[in-house]
Amino acid sequence: MTSDRQPNRARRSERSRRAILDATRALISEVGYAKTSIEAIAARAGVGKQTIYRWWPSKGAVIFDSFLALSEGAGGTALPDTGDLEADLKTVLRATAAEFADPEFEAPIRALGTEIINDPELAAQYREKLAGPVDEAKKARLRSGQEAGQLAADADLDLVLEMLYAPLAQRWLYRSGPLTPEYADALVEATLRAFRP
Amino acid sequence: MTSDRQPNRARRSERSRRAILDATRALISEVGYAKTSIEAIAARAGVGKQTIYRWWPSKGAVIFDSFLALSEGAGGTALPDTGDLEADLKTVLRATAAEFADPEFEAPIRALGTEIINDPELAAQYREKLAGPVDEAKKARLRSGQEAGQLAADADLDLVLEMLYAPLAQRWLYRSGPLTPEYADALVEATLRAFRP
Amino acid sequence: MTSDRQPNRARRSERSRRAILDATRALISEVGYAKTSIEAIAARAGVGKQTIYRWWPSKGAVIFDSFLALSEGAGGTALPDTGDLEADLKTVLRATAAEFADPEFEAPIRALGTEIINDPELAAQYREKLAGPVDEAKKARLRSGQEAGQLAADADLDLVLEMLYAPLAQRWLYRSGPLTPEYADALVEATLRAFRP
Amino acid sequence: MTSDRQPNRARRSERSRRAILDATRALISEVGYAKTSIEAIAARAGVGKQTIYRWWPSKGAVIFDSFLALSEGAGGTALPDTGDLEADLKTVLRATAAEFADPEFEAPIRALGTEIINDPELAAQYREKLAGPVDEAKKARLRSGQEAGQLAADADLDLVLEMLYAPLAQRWLYRSGPLTPEYADALVEATLRAFRP
DNA sequence: GTATAAACGAGACGGTACGTCATGTCTTCGG
DNA sequence: CCGAAGACATGACGTACCGTCTCGTTTATAC
């Protein structure tokens, strides 16, 4: 967890670190969050339990880091900018909706959510390391639209972002409705109406 | 969980049921979700473990029912209707924001959330028994506003509701921002702009 | 360990108790004392670890009880009494020497010794439950010899017993010499010389 | 353990060797045999674990050597010889009994015993390096008594020694009786009766 | 006097076992 | 026959040590 405790990080085994993170993701996909134990991760990674406890303070931290490692490759987080804000946002939101519907992502994201709900420190890490960069990219596209006069100059971009994404995330979390492309479009349209110049 | 299994529900001890539900709420408030065990609930309620397992299929179900019991008293779920939709919504959203900020509600609601994320059946129950009635009351107020010409006639009330509440809920869940009255007001104003006639 | 702790002994599973004691003896014979773990005993006995920890305070206590159970059957501890004390003692000491030399007894008795050396309470139990009855039988034979005028009337029978058996036991414990029939005979002869009337 | 393995003994650090042996004795006195770990010895001695594993094959060997180092100083192992065998033996046996009763010696000697019971090779070392020289000194005194006609000419001195000391050692090991001066005297008297000319 | 090879301290590693805790099932007994 | 009490098999927890294996860092001949 990028943690600052006593063991000497210079001597840390990169091999073990990767094996643990990989095993964690694999197990969460296969058996789900609740049934993924530290013991099973260690066994699957071919690693002693102590090697996990030495470097991570909790199961949540391991899970979190296994996500971080995953998303590290996905660096180019810039959104499309065709000049048409509405079209671009619809593209992106439809993609997000599709991603949420993908059963492949189901288990891991719920696992992450479970940990974040109950651990404020993890939540902070999540915002800083995972959500933050993505949100910045989104806000950059909004700002560009703002400059192009497609969004009110005084719009609070954080608020815009929340109104775009939170309903989607909530539907997914509570399974309270379908995540269709039409729904994504409706969200974009309503939000842009709310913040048009 | 008002479940349909074999034991004879007529002979069920109401005394034990209440004791279990009360003990559950107390423990979640006191030691948090993660440390609340069936064993502890049974001990605290002065009840055999089997009496819990006989009537509830999982820890989540017990927690859920302990909420249900709580909210049963809070029947009068009608929203204020002064004729001014914006003012009324601001009142309600400010109240919701304040409730979320109340540390008293913190632990139990997060406990409930944790269970719901990972258990689709529980999520369905949640929508039906807890969220549903409240949402209906909210939609009733929106419909009244619609009739009064304060909201577009073709507005999708489910979507309106989500845009009003989801950003608030998300901020709380991920602790990604403060839940101030101003924030509540801004949400109401933006949403009404999006759906004005 | 015939222990006096909180669990309700009336509800104890006799089946588990026997399985644990049997598994303990089997493991000590097979892999030796040092490698016999509580975990292995539980696995072999088809029993939860907690069932061991519930009823015994330490590995030593389990081992001890596994011996006790063994020796319980061996009730008839009376020594031969042909009227010739020296001949009878030689018979008995030769048998003891042979028993010590039997590799079958090797591992378990050393295991017991290891525990007794370091645990005074176990040592007390050993004297009371295992050594005591046997010593009484031996002293009975000595007393009979005393009455027959084959032993000094004022001989301290405890001391006689120790001089007969302690050298044998010490040779075995420290492997400081062979345990031959001749050695047994020599011990008997010397001891009887020391305490002749 | 004066062992014959590959590392170059010429370059061995005497400083570390002493520190390890000292730490071992200190720990055994302080926390007892069972709780004395290699890890703790290394930490206490300010030494790497490998430095212990390099020079000793087992915990028992370290413990044994820590005794050896202790007894090395006590070179003058000759027994008193006043010409009166009985008096001299009583003096010596009383001293041995007193030493056994000394709580200071309790923990270390029992630790040594624990190792020796289960390790034949250590037992051999014990006889050769520790018990042997002392026994030789005792036999020398017995031989001198034999020559003075105070002991049968054909007495087996090993047997005499065992009859003198084994009962004492056994009482101590199993805590089966008090180690009084009177007991020491009775042992000497009985043994000398058994082997008088 | 420096080079070089060892022993060294430190401690991370894959493991085993520890003793504790919670789970969900099963059994006993009292009302 | 329901419910309390709680023993049971199971299995994960987090900790302590095991014995092995690098890491730099002394140190102490051999050049």
Image (cartoon, coloured by chain):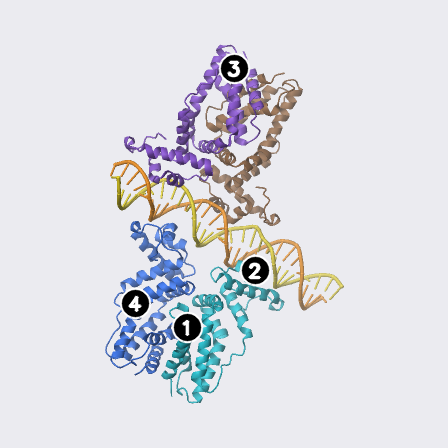
Chain colours: A brown, B purple, C blue, D cyan, E yellow, F orange
Question: Nearer the viewer's eye, disc 3 or disc 2?
Answer: 3
The residue that disc 2 covers is D44
Q: Secondary structure at mark 3?
A: helix
Task: Give the chain letter at badge 3.
Answer: B
Is any atom of residue C97 visible in this view?
yes
The residue that disc 1 covers is D179
Q: Position of residue D72 (x, y in %)?
A: 55, 73
* Label 1: how many Cα within 10 Å (few below 14, some 14–19, many 20+): many
Dot 2 and dot 1 within a common chain: yes
Residue A147 position by quadrant: top right
Is any atom of residue A78 visible in this view?
no
Question: Nearer the viewer's eye, disc 2 or disc 1?
Answer: 1
For marks 2 and 1, the one nearer the N-term is 2
Instruction: Name the residue type under label 1.
Output: Leu
Left/right placement of residue D170 relative to residue A186 reads left
Dot 1 and dot 4 within a common chain: no
Residue C26 position by quadrant: bottom left
The span from disc 2 to disc 1 (Cα, nearest Å) is 35 Å
Residue B193 vertical placement versus D155 (above, below): above
Split into 4 quadrants, where in the image is the C terminus of chain D?
Answer: bottom left
The residue that disc 4 covers is C133
Q: Which mark is residue B85?
A: 3
Residue C180 vertical placement versus D114 (above, below): below
